[in-house]
Image (cartoon, rainbow, N blue to C red):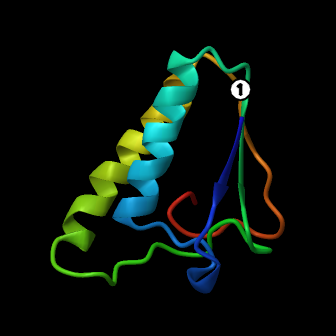
């Protein structure tokens, strides 16, 4: 399964919606017995930063949501491959 981040206008910066969508997709892939997940994006760089703009609570909620996403990736019983075109700088560093 390929998961493509689609926020090219923000160079795929993580926000609550993107993190929630990725976590849901990973959980679904595991439940459907997918053999591997490839995580990629529409733009040259996978993620350059975390997007903290977007309304009240984003800065408060995102760290815990990102941690839950990282745990879902770590605990997935299948390979999760990052197909990164360029540097991946920001929350993942």
| Residue at the right extreme of this rendering | 85
* Residue 5, image x, y percentages: 62, 61
Q: Of helix, strand and loop, which one carries label 1?
A: loop
The answer to whether residue 62 is left or right of residue 21 is left
Quarter residue 88 falls in: bottom right
Residue position marked by numbered label 1 in the rendering: 79
* Residue 73, image x, y percentages: 54, 34
The answer to whether residue 57 is left or right of residue 76 is left
Quarter residue 89 falls in: bottom right
Residue at 50% from the left image edge and 23% from the top image edge: 75
If the image is split into quadrants, where does the C terminus sit?
bottom right
Q: Which of 75 and 11 is in front in this view?
A: 11
Residue at 80% from the left image edge and 74% from the top image edge: 44
Tell me if mark 1 has few (under 14), some (14-19) or many (20+) residues whose alpha carbon lies within 10 angstroms of its own: some
* Residue 10, image x, y percentages: 56, 82
Residue at 45% from the left image edge and 50% from the top image edge: 21
Residue at 38% from the left image edge and 46% from the top image edge: 67
| Residue at the left extreme of this rendering | 56
If the image is split into quadrants, where does the N terminus sit?
top right
Above or below residue 77? Residue 83 is below
The answer to whether residue 24 is left or right of residue 29 is left
* Residue 57, image x, y percentages: 17, 71
């Amino acid at each position: 399964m390929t998961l493509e981040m689609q926020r090219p206008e923000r160079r795929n910066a993580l926000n609550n919606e993107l993190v929630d969508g990725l976590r849901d997709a990973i959980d679904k892939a595991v439940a459907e017995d997918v053999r591997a997940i490839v995580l990629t994006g529409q733009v040259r760089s996978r993620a350059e930063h975390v997007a903290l703009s977007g309304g009240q609570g984003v800065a408060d909620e995102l760290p815990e949501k990102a941690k839950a996403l990282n745990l879902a990736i770590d605990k997935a019983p299948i390979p999760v491959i990052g197909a990164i075109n360029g540097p991946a700088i920001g929350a993942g560093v």
